[in-house]
Image (tube, rainbow, N blue to C red):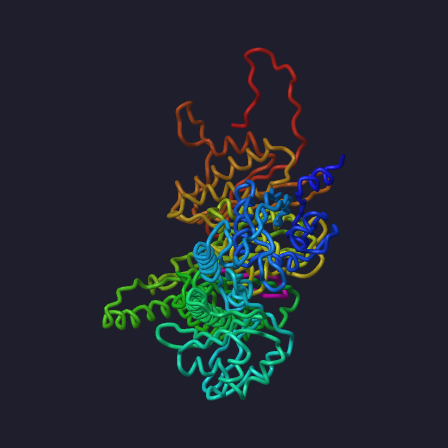
């Protein structure tokens, strides 16, 4: 015997509810018990819902959602009503939800348990929960949903989805006030164009919503006759909607009536005290939600306006070069901050690239950023050198602190001054020469034509605004055809719990993997590597990991790279910066990232460390390191030079076992393929060369007690 036959024999029906499609499938017995045509079939959810008492539907909906969340059975007693709302029977439903992705499917049985007694009304029939409990549950859900709505559109969507216990409206409208006119903010349950007569009417009109706004008192219209009697002028406009009852309630916040809310019903509603209490509570929550959304909408508009006014357009093309930029604001507050970039055409034909970060993520930071950006642009257009531009900008920002500090003291606000980091590059497009001045900002990155990514060390000074007399030394480099330079703010590096080192490592992977893509695609990939889809300047969907503002600027020199173009790096190590020796070693490792012999890489790093340390110990000057990898006829060649201003030439020593110095030239003889010392007009240059060789073969069985050779 089939399962359906067994269930039919015990007067039990089988049903299935698909939340995704909104369809309910009933067998013949379930259809009969629910008052549907006594044949199996699939019915829209609305058609089945109309057969349940509204209070019971609200309750079973909550029970099913709870069962979905907890993975338990859902069981309830439900009253089945006819088209006139009279109770036909009471049934018991037992069901099991199955979650699939973001949707769920419910499979269950339904069985008749009791007939209503003669003379019993729907309100008197026994049910699983009472009206008060359903009302409280509904208000809690409605309050939570309205509190989470972040915009006016979201508030209206929540209001349209409210299913009130026992008397759900099928038409809603929210009215606002603009001067002396009444407007419709949003509506639900009406066809397009139905709102036209009500979109703009005077506040003194004979219309319920206008009267509610004028008086601040609710208006309940339980019958069409009552509507026609009280508002004869507007009744012809409302008549064709076919509604039976209306409730118009004021939307009041802090004693001010900001609009009105209409709930219209196709079935008669008497508006009992309990029903009026629910409507009044919903109206208060709706008013609060709309007020919050209005503030949020204003903040978003202000944010977008600030971004559009403060962030520059890249402007005319740079001859012989491609430029791309991105700006993503922080996810908090007004979503504005102190990061910026700029591309400035100069009177000399050169182009200045600027990127910076004013401390903070608020309106004050955005305001200082705007002033500082204008000042930098003015100094650049006057033709000052990069070091002079940053020196003047630092004095400008420090002067703003002095002036604003006096104002703060008068007002009793002791906010600390703000500083700014900045990286300023002056580019000569025909030659690719770049001069860099840095004020406490992350250093630039260069991707060579063969995809090698190098952090280019650049001399720098304090952030802008701290010391008005700070000097900003310049660093020079040449961007060869096919090479790309990236500058960015620390938000691109440190978002997601990274520090500067791990942040660079993350971006290096992106730069290496997008060698063949356009500059615009690379800019998108860099931002997407941090937190999601990229954009030029938006508050859109990038709120997941925006811990800080992000600005990134890319420039690439057009042209075909030279055949076997060498890769180069250079840096200064000053007497006061011995910690940069580690950076010099890292530069050489990055330069040799694809070198085949790891022992030669270790040798090169050791020799660089010895050469730079020797300059710092035995001279009073700065060590200038220049390293180059070039392709020869047979193999690649690494050449490293370390120059200084000392006149004394190095001498070969014979250090003893315990000596802590004197090994430099001995190591050079042992490890380098070629080396030398070249006197210069002022100072000298010590250099060595390594020729790439295959990985040395190792003895598969070196024997007991033997150890592999070590270059050191």
Instruction: Give the residue at x 65% y 17%.
Output: 700
Please, which residue is most extreme toward the top here?
704
* Residue 366 visible, this angle: no
Please, which residue is most extreme toward the front here?
118
Please determine whether, in this image, residue 511 is positioned above or below residue 384: above
Instruction: Give the residue at x 38% y 66%.
Output: 394
Predominant SS of the magenta segment: strand
Please determine whether, in this image, residue 212 is positioned above or below residue 613: below
Say which of 517 and 97 sits in front: 97
- The quarter of the picture where the N terminus appears is top right
Say which of 126 and 403 sits in front: 126
Is 254 colored magenta in this rendering? no
Q: Quadrant of residue 412?
A: bottom left
Please determine whether, in this image, residue 98 is positioned above or below residue 356: above
Left or right: residue 33 compared with residue 658: right
Q: Which residues are magenta?
A: 426-438
* Residue 413 visible, this angle: yes
Instruction: Give the residue at x 56% y 44%.
Output: 74
Residue 227 pos. (x, y %): 52, 81
């Amino acid at each position: 015997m089939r399962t359906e036959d067994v269930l039919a024999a015990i007067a039990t029906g089988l049903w299935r509810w698909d939340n995704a499609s909104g369809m309910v499938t009933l067998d013949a017995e379930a259809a009969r018990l629910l008052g549907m045509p006594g044949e199996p079939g699939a019915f829209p959810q609305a058609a089945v819902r109309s057969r349940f008492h509204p209070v019971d539907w609200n309750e079973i909906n909550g029970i099913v959602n709870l069962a979905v969340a907890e993975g338990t059975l859902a069981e309830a007693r439900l009253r089945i009503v006819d088209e006139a709302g009279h109770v036909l029977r009471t049934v018991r439903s037992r069901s099991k939800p199955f979650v699939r992705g973001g949707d769920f499917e419910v499979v269950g049985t339904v069985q008749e348990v009791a007939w209503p007694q003669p003379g019993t009304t729907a309100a008197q029939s026994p049910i699983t929960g009472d009206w008060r409990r359903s009302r409280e549950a509904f208000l809690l859900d409605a309050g939570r949903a309205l509190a989470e709505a972040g915009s006016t559109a979201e508030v209206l969507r929540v209001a349209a989805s409210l299913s009130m216990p026992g008397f759900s409206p099928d038409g809603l409208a929210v009215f606002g006030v603009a001067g002396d006119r009444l407007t419709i903010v949003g509506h639900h349950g009406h066809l397009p164009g139905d709102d036209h007569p009500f979109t703009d009417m005077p506040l003194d009109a004979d219309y319920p919503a206008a009267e509610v706004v004028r008086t601040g008192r609710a208006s309940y219209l339980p019958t069409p006759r009552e509507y026609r009697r009280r508002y004869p002028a507007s009744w012809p406009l409302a008549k064709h909607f076919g509604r039976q009852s209306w409730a118009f309630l004021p939307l009041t916040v802090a004693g001010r009536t900001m609009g009105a809310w209409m709930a219209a019903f196709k079935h008669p509603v008497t508006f009992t005290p309990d029903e009026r209490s629910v409507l009044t509570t919903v109206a208060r929550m709706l008013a609060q939600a709309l007020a919050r959304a209005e503030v949020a909408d204003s903040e978003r508009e202000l944010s977008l306006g600030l971004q559009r006014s403060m962030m520059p357009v890249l402007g005319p093309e740079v001859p012989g070069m491609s430029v791309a930029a991105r700006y993503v604001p922080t996810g908090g507050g007004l979503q504005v901050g102190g990061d910026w970039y700029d591309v400035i055409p100069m009177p000399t034909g050169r182009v200045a690239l600027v990127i910076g970060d004013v401390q903070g993520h608020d309106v004050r930071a955005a305001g200082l950023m705007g002033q500082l950006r204008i000042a930098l642009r003015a100094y650049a257009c006057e033709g000052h050198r990069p070091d002079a531009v940053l020196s003047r900008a630092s004095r400008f920002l420090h002067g703003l602190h002095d002036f604003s500090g006096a104002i703060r003291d008068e007002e009793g606000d002791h906010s600390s001054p703000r500083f700014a980091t900045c990286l300023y590059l002056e580019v000569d497009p025909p030659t690719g020469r770049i001069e860099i001045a840095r004020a406490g900002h992350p250093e630039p990155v260069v991707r060579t034509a063969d995809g090698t990514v190098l952090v280019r060390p650049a001399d720098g000074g304090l952030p802008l605004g701290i010391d008005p007399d700070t000097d900003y030394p310049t660093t020079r480099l040449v961007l060869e055809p096919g090479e790309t330079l990236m500058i960015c703010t620390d938000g691109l590096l440190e978002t997601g719990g990274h520090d500067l080192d791990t942040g660079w490592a993350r971006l290096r992977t992106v730069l290496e993997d997008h060698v063949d893509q356009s500059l615009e695609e690379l800019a998108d990939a860099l931002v997407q590597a941090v937190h999601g889809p990229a954009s030029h300047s938006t508050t859109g969907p990038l709120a997941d990991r925006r811990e800080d503002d992000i600005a990134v600027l890319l420039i690439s020199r057009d042209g075909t790279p030279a055949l076997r173009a060498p890769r180069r790096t250079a840096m200064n190590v000053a007497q006061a910066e011995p910690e940069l020796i580690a950076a010099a070693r890292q530069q050489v490792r990055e330069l040799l990232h694809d070198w085949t012999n790891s022992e030669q890489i270790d040798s090169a790093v050791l020799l660089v460390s010895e050469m730079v340390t020797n300059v710092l110990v035995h001279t009073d000057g700065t060590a200038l390191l220049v390293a180059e990898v070039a392709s020869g006829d047979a193999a690649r060649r690494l050449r490293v030079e370390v120059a200084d201003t000392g006149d004394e030439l190095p001498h070969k020593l014979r250090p003893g076992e315990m000596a802590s110095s004197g090994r430099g030239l001995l190591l050079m003889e042992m490890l380098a393929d070629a080396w030398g010392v070249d006197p210069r007009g002022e100072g000298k240059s010590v250099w060595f060369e390594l020729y790439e060789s295959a990985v040395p073969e190792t003895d598969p069985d070196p024997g007991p007690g033997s150890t592999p050779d070590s270059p050191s």
